[in-house]
Amino acid sequence: MAENEKQSLKDKVFESQVWRSIFRHGYADTHRNRVLQVAGNVFLHLHPTKTRRHALRIRFTWCAGGVTFLLFLVTVVTGVILMFYYRPTGEHAYIDIKMLEFDVPFGMVIRNMHRWAAHAMVIAVWVHMFRVFMTGSYKPPREFNWVIGVILLVLTLLLSFTGYLLPWDQLAIWAVTVGTNMARATPLLGHEGPFYELVGVNARYDARSFLIAGQVVGPPALLRFYVLHCIFIPIAASVLMIVHFWRVRKDGGISGPM
Amino acid sequence: MADASGTATAATSPAVAKVGAAAEARAVSKAQAPAKTIELADKAHTWPYLVRLEFLAGLIVMIVLTVWSIALDAPLEEIAQPNRTPNPSKAPWYFLGLQDMLVYFDPWLAGVVLPSLIIVGLMVIPYVDVNPKGNGYYTFKYRKFAISTFIFGFFFLWIVLIVMGTFLRGPGWNLFAPWDYWDPHKVVPLTSVDLSEFLFGIPASSAGGVLLGLAAIGGWFSLGAVFYIWKRNSPTMKKLGFVRYAIVAGLWLTMMALPAKMVLRIGFNIKYVLVTPWFNI
Ligand code: HEM
């Protein structure tokens, strides 16, 4: 009797309309379910249902592209949390960061995670590029995905660089000052660059003042970098990552020996 | 592939599964990689074999990151003070390779032109590397030039300069050994000369100096032309073609101009090769 009741309870749950609307297939370890587990799941269906065996080897991909993506997701999640506590103005920025340490529960851990994940992402993306080069995976038909990758690399660095200014401490403004000073020397477009007279740029209107909204790294630069850091570059990078992953599939999956 | 689409049609949610399978079939038929010829036995189910690896990798990364974030606090110095420049002022660590190039080249080159060329140079790699070998597997034997060039640029001109910039560059951007005290008043006697002064004792901005500078730079890049003439009938060069070769040679010599300038600067104290009223190299 008890067996029967158990069975009918199981049927009631697993055959119910609600359950079946959520889980499209059973969990018995069959070939069909293994395929459906991937094809029927919006997140997993980024993958093909079957993968070439060599691509499973850590030795081949070092998992570096995936790790880069994971670290990007970590910075998105922790970054959104930080946005609740941070105001990008000259009066508030530094104090808000200090408050993370002394006033916000787990504020410091969130900030640390955001920063270390960002640094780790820079390293991971280099490692990934290195691996892709070493396996010759940029060769036809994957040429264009490599180009997208290079843009992603630049965006990763810019994300890190724009974020560097936000704590508004000595480290931040001077690192960004050193970095953006280069723009002064842009040929034609920077007021200390070769041939600047031809274009007629000056210290107030040139490539550098366009980047930092003024002649020195001040509060307008902070706001500009904040918007670039939290909105513009993450969206651009996300769009390109979507294209990047799509192209990995369309170009025939992870490269491998013929 | 065949059995994947076969089961998909019988799926509980045929729409979803069919789309997946169709995309799959398209991907395979479109890809130039001969996926079709790959034995089915060469493939494993993504679930569980790949997903479990990704899960494990993700878990390890998250554990390391969490421990790291609990153990080590992100730096926060004093509040920004626009009128107090720290010495040294360093860019973020990942740009220190670029900052170090400022020792050897003026900002318009080191800070703008060369970084742009790095980006462009990386992007053109797939279009100038016509070697079909080594696509999808590790090999050094068949790609000696490509791999040595990449490793030289990546490790020596990028990573090593970053490590140096982080740990060895102190006040005044002077070099300090790791055990040295960073003395802000360290004065390095710098009596640098320009190339024409070094060779013939004529000022670099004189007509003779400019001619010499142009000749030196022209000579450097004409090495590419000499190599072309020498090798023009080799099968590799035929396959590469003139335009691709010119791009590779130009980028390669530009990259190598950095170590060349390092040798001139560190070995002979030479500051500029070419001096003009508009820019110096
Ligand atoms: C935000 C940065 C990036 C992310 C999140 C990312 C992610 C990925 C992932 C998940 C893969 C699948 C295989 C693997 O994990 O290795 C992949 C493949 C690939 N990536 Fe990236 N990537 C990024 C940047 C780059 C860069 C900088 C390059 C090159 C300059 C690049 C070129 C490629 C190529 C050519 C493939 C195909 C490799 C193959 O088929 O073996 N990606 N990427």
Image (cartoon, grey):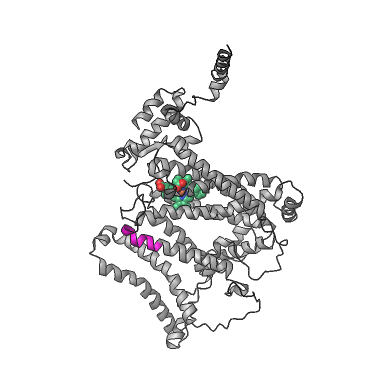
The secondary structure making up most of the magenta span is helix
Q: Residue furthest bottom?
A: B201
Is residue A1 shown in magenta? no
User: In the figure, B218 relative to A47: above or below?
Assistant: below
Quarter the N terminus of chain A occupies:
top right
Is B260 or B144 nearer to us in this picture?
B144
Q: Left or right: B266 with respect to A161? A: left
State the extent of the magenta-drawn residues as a range: B140-149
**Outermost residue toward the top in this view:** A1
Residue A110 coordinates in the image, percent (x, y) = 67, 48
Compare residues B47 and B194 and report the one nearer the observer.
B47
Residue B251, by quadrant, is bottom left
Q: Is residue B167 left or right of residue A130?
A: right
Quarter residue B186 falls in: bottom right
Quarter of image, res B5: top left
- Residue B60 rendering spot, x and y as whole percentages: 55, 46
Q: Could you tell me residue B100's position as x and y percent?
A: 53, 69
Q: Work out whether B259 lies above or below B18.
A: below
- Residue at the extreme right: A103
Residue at the extreme left of the image, as rendered: B233
The image shows residue A172 at horizontal and vertical percentages of 65, 60
Q: Residue at horizontal 49%, vertical 35%?
A: A44
Q: Is residue B26 positioned above or below A239 on the image?
A: above
B141 in magenta: yes
Residue drawn at the location 53% of the way across and 70% of the way down: B102
For residue B106, say whether it is visible: yes
The residue shown at (38%, 52%) is A135
Asked if one can make out residue B274 in the rendered structure from this viewpoint, the answer is no
